[in-house]
């Protein structure tokens, strides 16, 4: 008797079968799904995916210990009736990202481990482009570097152009839906590598418009078929599904197109991965926030500053306000695009210097280390999360001077400041903090506050050298007060506070500073 297969909780189970016949276009001509029976008897379905020639696959990631089984249903005689079973066993895997229980505006792994979400942009992480020095090895090195820096999310457009045996297309032909399995076989390797390094892959199914995009499909039926394929192939990995990049480029009246795609993704994903949608700038996606398939209160693109100069404190405050508004939805809020540090498209394939009239850094909030750091803190001080970006990596070495290069020295200061930002919040129970700007006042500049009343207070100030603060708690409680320098990571102890008295706090200067007050005892 064969030994029963075991699969670790949050691990990966795969099974592959061959069809009985040859098909002109298997992607179109074969339909196959697997009915899954969980240990508690609950049932779900997931499509099988075509893996080239006559080979079809099933992927599952079990989230509960005990026996799992499944049965394939298909019009193909060789696939129909195939069965499988395994036993899910305990593991130290943490699982994918999901909304945190009891604190749904924040994120945790499936095992409950809180996650301070820090994302990066590499729209072409699945691509190969020799002139840009972009290939599997350079992408894996990029992933290694980002993992060491504490990033836990990278979003990538599927249709970014992977070269496999001379092909650079997801579909060999959009009109006839001739899928290129070699594309996805390479993508499998890169998604799996991100996961192995503790990084969730944010899979952007397609851009709104372009040669390879939602616009390129012949019909809505074709779009839904593609969405099911992506779910079938990748939902068992640690991923999030972003229905579209810059969805509104397809037209402002196309919301229903995306609503239907989002529902299709939700319907066929038994793993219930995070789902979102990304707009063109400057926009939120609150028009989708009440959709059952939408996992985020917002996954917005916001800049709120001109391209040609460094942002002002008022412009950063405006950006923060656009992150505060969608908190009413009680779901995680992410600024999915707010800066590509030090990006310059001068010398890129397109003549953007002439188009924009800018010869130098040409992205909002990206001109200087100070601007980039301050806007990143503005996002965090809204109780929101960020997907950031760097000029030398955000587009895989294209649309930028020079090749794809995660080690570019020009990124060092920006990366270091983000590492300090993540480490600061990760040292706290940040999910307990609420926006409470009313506890802090200033006559000039800006001062923002996140607080758990009576326990912890985080204050960020900019363009002021003096502020007033009240913990607004029990008068007998004492708070340890420290000043944090976000440029260096240095801490300075200040005099203890006693709530709820309003106290005046002097700062060394009008740069950006952070204060942390924590209850003693």
Image: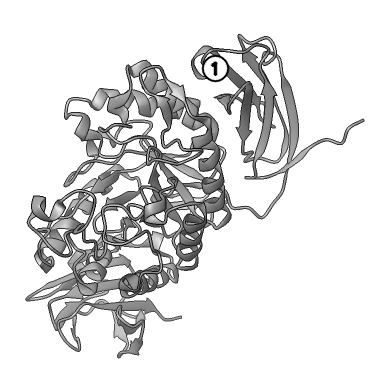
The residue to which callout 1 is attached is 26
Q: Residue at x 68, y 30 (%)?
A: 15
> Which quadrant of the structure image shows residue 247?
top left
Q: Residue at x 40, y 64 (%)?
A: 406
SS state under label 1: helix
In the image, 394 versus 373, the foreground residue is 394
Q: Residue furthest right?
A: 1
In the image, 235 versus 271, the foreground residue is 235
Q: Crowdedness of circle 1 by 10 Å Cα count: few (<14), some, many (20+)?
A: many
Q: Is residue 95 left or right of residue 301?
A: right
Residue 456 appears in the picture as rendered: no
Q: Is residue 145 above or below residue 20?
A: below
Residue 406 appears in the picture as rendered: yes
In the image, 263 versus 226, the foreground residue is 226
Q: Is residue 461 left or right of residue 205?
A: left
Q: Is residue 18 above or below residue 146?
A: above
Residue 452: x and y in percent read 34, 65
Residue 299: x and y in percent read 30, 45
Q: Residue at x 21, y 61 (%)?
A: 344
Q: Is residue 279 left or right of residue 48?
A: left
Q: Residue at x 18, y 64 (%)?
A: 361
Residue 147: x and y in percent read 49, 63
Q: Is residue 323 above or below residue 402?
A: above
């Amino acid at each position: 008797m064969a030994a029963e297969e075991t699969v670790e909780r949050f691990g990966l189970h795969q099974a592959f079968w061959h069809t009985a016949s040859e098909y002109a276009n298997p992607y179109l001509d074969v339909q196959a799904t697997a009915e899954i029976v969980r240990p508690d008897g609950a049932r779900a379905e997931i499509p099988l995916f075509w893996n080239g020639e006559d080979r079809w696959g099933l992927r599952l990631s079990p989230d509960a210990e005990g026996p799992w089984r499944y049965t394939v249903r298909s019009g193909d005689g060789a696939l129909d009736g195939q069965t499988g079973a395994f036993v899910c066993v305990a593991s130290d895997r943490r699982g994918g990202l999901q909304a945190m229980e009891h604190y749904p505006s924040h994120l945790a792994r499936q095992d409950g481990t809180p996650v301070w979400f820090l994302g990066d942009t590499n729209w072409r992480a699945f691509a190969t482009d020799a002139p840009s020095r972009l290939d599997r090895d350079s992408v894996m090195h990029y992933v290694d570097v980002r993992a060491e820096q504490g990033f836990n999310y990278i979003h990538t457009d599927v249709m970014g152009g992977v070269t496999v045996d001379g092909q650079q297309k997801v579909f060999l032909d959009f009109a006839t839906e001739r899928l290129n399995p070699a594309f996805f076989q390479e993508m499998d390797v890169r998604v799996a590598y991100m996961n192995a390094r503790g990084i969730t892959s944010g899979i952007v199914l397609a851009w709104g418009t372009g040669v390879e995009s939602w616009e390129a499909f012949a019909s809505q039926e074709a779009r839904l078929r593609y969405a099911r394929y992506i779910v079938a192939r990748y939902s068992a990995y640690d991923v999030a599904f972003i229905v579209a990049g810059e969805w509104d480029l397809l037209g402002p009246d196309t919301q229903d197109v995306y609503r239907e795609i989002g529902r299709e993704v939700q319907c066929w994903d038994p793993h219930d991965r995070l789902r979102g949608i990304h707009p063109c700038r400057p926009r939120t996606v609150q028009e989708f926030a009440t959709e059952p398939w939408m996992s985020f209160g917002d996954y917005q693109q916001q800049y709120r500053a001109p391209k040609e100069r460094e942002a002002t404190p008022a412009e950063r405050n405006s950006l923060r306000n656009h992150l505060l508004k969608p908190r009413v939805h009680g779901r995680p809020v992410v600024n999915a695009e707010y800066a590509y540090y030090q990006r310059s498209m001068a010398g890129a394939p397109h003549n953007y210097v002439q188009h924009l009239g800018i010869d130098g850094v040409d992205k909002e909030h990206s001109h200087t280390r100070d601007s980039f750091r301050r806007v990143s803190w503005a996002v965090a001080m809204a109780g929101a999360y960020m997907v950031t970006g760097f000029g030398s990596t955000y587009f895989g070495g294209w649309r930028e001077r020079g090749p794809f290069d995660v080690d570019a020295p020009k990124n060092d200061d920006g990366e270091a400041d983000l590492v300090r930002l993540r480490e600061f919040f990760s040292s706290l129970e940040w999910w307990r903090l609420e926006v409470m700007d009313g506890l802090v006042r200033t006559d000039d500049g800006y001062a923002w506050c996140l607080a758990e009343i009576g326990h912890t207070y985080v204050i960020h100030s900019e363009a002021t050298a003096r502020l007033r603060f009240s913990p607004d708690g029990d008068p007998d409680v004492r708070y340890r007060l420290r000043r944090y320098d976000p440029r260096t990571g240095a801490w300075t102890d200040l005099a203890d506070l006693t709530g709820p008295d309003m106290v005046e706090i002097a700062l060394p200067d009008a740069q950006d500073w952070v204060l942390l007050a924590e209850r003693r005892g």
